[in-house]
Image (spheres, helix red, strand yellow):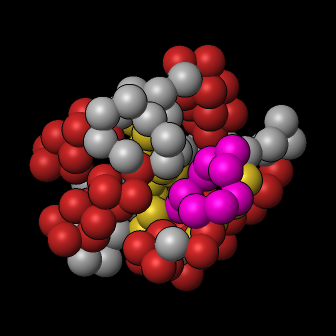
Amino acid sequence: MATILVVDDEKNIRILYQEELEAEGYKVLTAENADEAIKILDNEKVDVVVLDLRMPGTHGIDALEKMMVKIRDLSVLINTAYSEYRDDFLTWLAEDYILKSADLSVLKDKIKKILEKKGKI
């Protein structure tokens, strides 16, 4: 079973994503900020990180860089409401970049493609 880490400061989004992704058969861990996510990565084997960018404390781009230094082959999917960060070269470290939407089909499809590429599905 693939493990997904959802990092988002909005509690309702974490709950929604957890419910939806667990219904898809994934184990889902959640973190409300980047620092908590990095601690989880120290203790858990995670296949995909779904990462928000604008959060209190450590910004998601800084967290992405820290995560990639810690785990070189980590697959991170940036999931944000802000398109302007797409041009920041540090976001290119992520596997993909999507804009948040009420329609979770894009998020689910991207996760599935990442896991297929990694041979986890």
Looking at the image, is 85 positioned above or below residue 102? below
- Dividing the picture into quarters, in which one does residue 31 lie? top left
The residue at 70%/59% (across/down) is: 83
71 relative position to 82: left or right: left
Assess whether residue 120 is covered by the magenta stretch: no
The residue at 29%/42% (across/down) is: 58
Q: Quadrant of the C terminus?
A: bottom right
1 relative position to 121: left or right: left
Q: How many marks?
A: 0
The residue at 19%/71% (across/down) is: 69
The residue at 72%/53% (across/down) is: 99
Find residue 71 and report its horizontal and vertical position in percent.
22, 69
Residue 81 seen anywhere in this rendered image of the structure: yes
Looking at the image, is 19 positioned above or below residue 89? above
Residue 37 seen anywhere in this rendered image of the structure: no
Question: As rendered, which of 79 and 83 lies closer to the eye?
Answer: 83
Assess whether residue 78 is covered by the magenta stretch: yes
Looking at the image, is 17 positioned above or below residue 90? above
The magenta-colored residue range is: 77-85
Question: As rendered, which of 59 and 17 lies closer to the eye?
Answer: 59
Find residue 22 and report its horizontal and vertical position in percent.
59, 35
- Dividing the picture into quarters, in which one does residue 97 lie? bottom right
- Dividing the picture into quarters, in which one does residue 2 lie? bottom left
Question: As rendered, which of 71 and 80 lies closer to the eye?
Answer: 80
Find residue 90 and report its horizontal and vertical position in percent.
41, 73
87 relative position to 88: left or right: right
Find residue 13 and report its horizontal and vertical position in percent.
62, 27
